[in-house]
Image: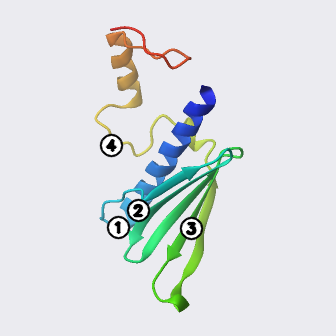
Amino acid sequence: MKSILTRTFVILFAFLLGAAAVKVMTAETVEASFADSGKRYIAVTGPYQDGVSLLYVIDQETQHLAVYEARGGATNSHRLHFVGARNIELDTMIDGYHDESDLSHQDLEAAILKSGNLLPEDGTKTGG
């Protein structure tokens, strides 16, 4: 169960990281066009500019993120460009960074504890 939660978190984190990066570079809305995963790698693509997409690849074993830019268009202009990579192990341990949510992690945790709707280690919901 913990493996499934970890995989889900990594996919969500990769998508949010990509969306945040694109938001900084452009004012357009970003949506994932395609996502796929296997036992080791997760790949997510999304539009970046006209004729350009970004590909995010996460290695679940090493917790590394790699980003590529893919250009389409005429046959002689196709290209795949390596943008960057990062070890995201420590990034995923941060409760919040540039988080513009209505509630901080601490405030949300306090609200959940106060309501009695707790999520124990096995992921099942308890309380009312």
**Residue 90 appears at what percent x and percent y?**
61, 41
Q: Residues within 10 Å of mark 1 (few under 14, many from 20)?
A: few
Give the SS element for disc 2. helix
Q: Amino acid at mark 3?
A: Tyr
Give the SS element for disc 4. loop
Q: Earlier in the sequence, mark 2 or mark 4?
A: 2
* Mark 4 vs mark 1, CA separation in Å: 18 Å
Q: Which residue is mark 2?
A: 22
Q: Which residue is mark 3?
A: 68
In the rendered image, which quarter is residue 28 located in? bottom left
Residue at position x 37%, y 57% from top? 31
Q: Is residue 59 above or below residue 114?
A: below
* Mark 2 vs mark 4, CA separation in Å: 16 Å
In the rendered image, which quarter is residue 116 located in? top left
Q: Which residue is mark 1?
A: 26
Q: Disc 2 or disc 3, which is closer to the eye?
A: 3
Mark 4 and 3 residues: CB-CB less than 8 Å, in contact?
no
